Image (cartoon, rainbow, N blue to C red):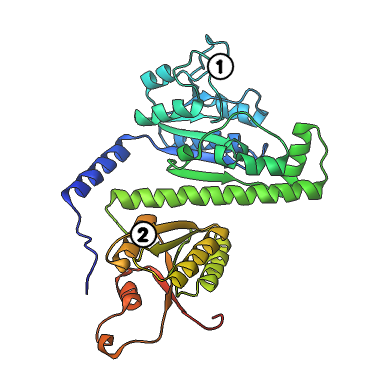
Amino acid sequence: MTGVDRRPSPEKFLRQAELEERHERRGKLKIFLGYASGVGKSYRMLDEGRRRKERGQDVVMAAAQHTVSEDVEELIERLEVIPPRMDLGAPALDVAGIRKRHPSVCLIDGLAYNNPPGSRNPYRWQDVEELLRNGISVITSINLQYVAERQEQVEAIRGRVVKESVPLAFLLTADEIEIVDAPPEYCVDRANSRTGVRVAPEELSRQLSELREIALLLAAEVVDHQLEEYLHRNGVEQHYGANERILVCLTPRSNAALMIRRARRQAERFHGELYAVYVEQPDLEDEDRKTLDLNLALSREARAQVHVLHGEDPVGAILKFAGEQGVTQIFVGHSQRTRWWNSWRPNPVERLILESDGIDVRIFPHSGGAM
């Protein structure tokens, strides 16, 4: 039986050491994520800073919102404040001053700000990244509508457009993310009072429910990335995410329509990702090629990420891809017919199960009705 060589190389050990060293030097990033304005993320962020200071950590405040409530103002008064720069035409983080002071933790309210011309970085999130690289931990806040890759989805719900944004890739570097939740009736009252536009409570409640779901999925994606980074640093090849990652193995004879339908349903149920792969086979007959093309088209219609793999060992190629993508389930077709001279050794599906190293494998007959 041919196995997959998982022995770590010297280069891998070196990469592990470099990743761990970089992780230890870098400051820690905590993000308070609000799915609507007025849920109280500024207060939660500052209260976290207050509690850390009371525990003996060196905490400073470096940026606050332009207008704050009395309870937020009271928390700010308890903290050391590094004033913003005022020489650029608009307030900006004093990155040089923060680095010189070098606190253990820096509180920065409002991550999604564009810096004024003449600043050392165009965007505030880049200022935060600079502080993190220099070993200063940052606690910050952001509303869902400012996450660049979620803006179109959020705008369709809210009906309002914002100019500032923070890339999702930066949020994925967070060591901790906390969603600031609030009762729907509280959010409805705050939203109506802040915007001055009266929205029917049932409509606003529906919007908030949809935004909350997007925020929860985003937080799960951050946690998933944290897990992957941890496993990479510790040299774990087979990693498992917070979300399901389902891989459908296509062949000309597989019951692809059933597998793809079941996989799509499960991916949506668990807010996971769907992959479809085919290992290139030479000299396919015309009928098999047409069937395969149809299966690939069905996969794309189901919004699967389609990949064509290459290699003389199809099982090895599938397992390698599954390991790289953090796949949690593999869907594969299987024929019950076995030639008598092959009965003494594992067939490809049996070998896939034996070598899947903890990945769940679901087997679908090549023909027949739904399971």
* Residue at horizontal 57 percent and vertical 25 percent from the top: 64
Image-based side of 311 in relation to 203, left or right: left
Give the image location of residue 48, x and y in percent: 51, 38
Q: Is residue 302 above or below residue 176?
A: below
In the rendered image, residue 155, in percent from the top left (x then y), is placed at: 68, 39
Residue drawn at x 19%, y 59% is: 7
Sequence order check, earlier mark of 2 and 1:
1
Percent position of residue 156, x then y: 69, 43
Mark 2 residue type: Leu
Report the residue marked by disc 2. Answer: 309
Q: In which quarter of the image is residue 280?
A: bottom left
Q: Which mark is residue 91?
A: 1
Image quarter hosting the N terminus: bottom left
Res 199 quadrant in image: top right
Residue 241 can be seen, yes or no: no
Label 2 sits on a secondary structure element that is: strand
**Mark-to-mark CA distance, 2 and 1:** 52 Å
Residue lying at 53% horizontally and 67% vertically, measured from the top left: 260
Q: What is the x, y in percent for residue 313?
A: 28, 66
The reply to whether callout 2 and callout 1 are in contact (CB within 8 Å) is: no
Task: Say if residue 25 shows up in the picture.
Answer: yes
Helix, strand or loop at mark 1: loop
Of the pair 183 and 86, the residue shown nearer to us: 86
Mark 1 residue type: Pro
